[in-house]
Amino acid sequence: MNITVTGRHMEMTDALKAYIESALEKIHGHFDKVIDADVVLDVEKHRHIAEINLHANGVRIHSKEASPDMYASVDAVIAKLDKQVRKFKDRINRHKPRSAGEKRMYNHAIISMPHLDNGDVDQSGAASTHLVVKHEKVSMKPMDVNEAAMQLDLVEDHDFLVFINAESSQVNVIYSREDGTYGLIEPQF
């Protein structure tokens, strides 16, 4: 298992790294293979924040916790991550496996339009262009709608998930709604 531990606004000690690695070994037992775990520790005034992104068996699981003590934050985020992993495994065991499909890659970019004072023309007289502020490659595997909803539950920092619908072989988007339900966007041709 590849573990990357990063500290922001703090000095990383070997004891803290060893503590995190031993705690993540317990999580490692739940999966056939764990690709990597990214741990970010941050200190903001009196808050100690621990954040873990786990990439395992084609699934991304994100957890984040804060407390006045870094070790308590690490314990809380590991407990939360363990709960998410157990919930994921229980749901997987209840569903019948789908047929093996190929993974597909898809690119997406977040585009920002810089604000200009005189309409959509900048000082040089040329029309303004869009500015790509973030670019990310995401591997997509075919899954059914229930599996996509489960994956969206596991990733806390996203409001939507783009996936390939196993039934229609088309790209779909599932998003969480404010009332706790999910919305599904399907292409129409």
Image: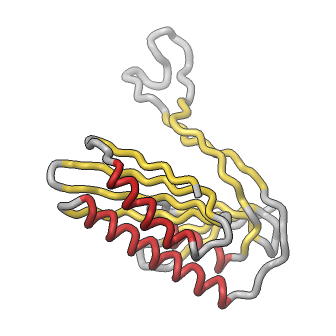
Left-right relation of 83 to 67: right
Q: 153 or 1: which is nearer to us?
A: 1
Residue 119 place in picture, x, y as percent: 44, 25
Q: Check the picture and name the quadrant holding the N terminus.
A: bottom right
Residue at point 59%, 39% (across, down): 135
Residue at point 49%, 49% (across, down): 4
Q: Check the picture and name the quadrant holding the C terminus.
A: bottom right
The answer to whether residue 164 is above or below residue 150 is above
- Asked whether residue 57 appears in the rendered view, the answer is yes
Instruction: Count every numbered label the image shows and give the total.
Output: 0
Q: 7 or 128: which is nearer to us?
A: 7
Rendering quarter of residue 100: bottom right
Left-right relation of 57 to 85: right
- Asked whether residue 149 appears in the rendered view, the answer is no
Residue 59 place in picture, x, y as percent: 62, 65
The answer to whether residue 124 is above or below residue 115 is above
Rendering quarter of residue 169: bottom right
Residue 64 place in picture, x, y as percent: 37, 62
Q: How is the image coloured?
A: secondary structure
Left-right relation of 108 to 50: right
Residue at point 45%, 71% (across, down): 81
Residue reaching furthest to the left: 46
Residue reaching furthest to the top: 124
Residue at point 53%, 61% (across, down): 54
Residue 134 place in picture, x, y as percent: 53, 39
Q: 168 or 142: which is nearer to us?
A: 142
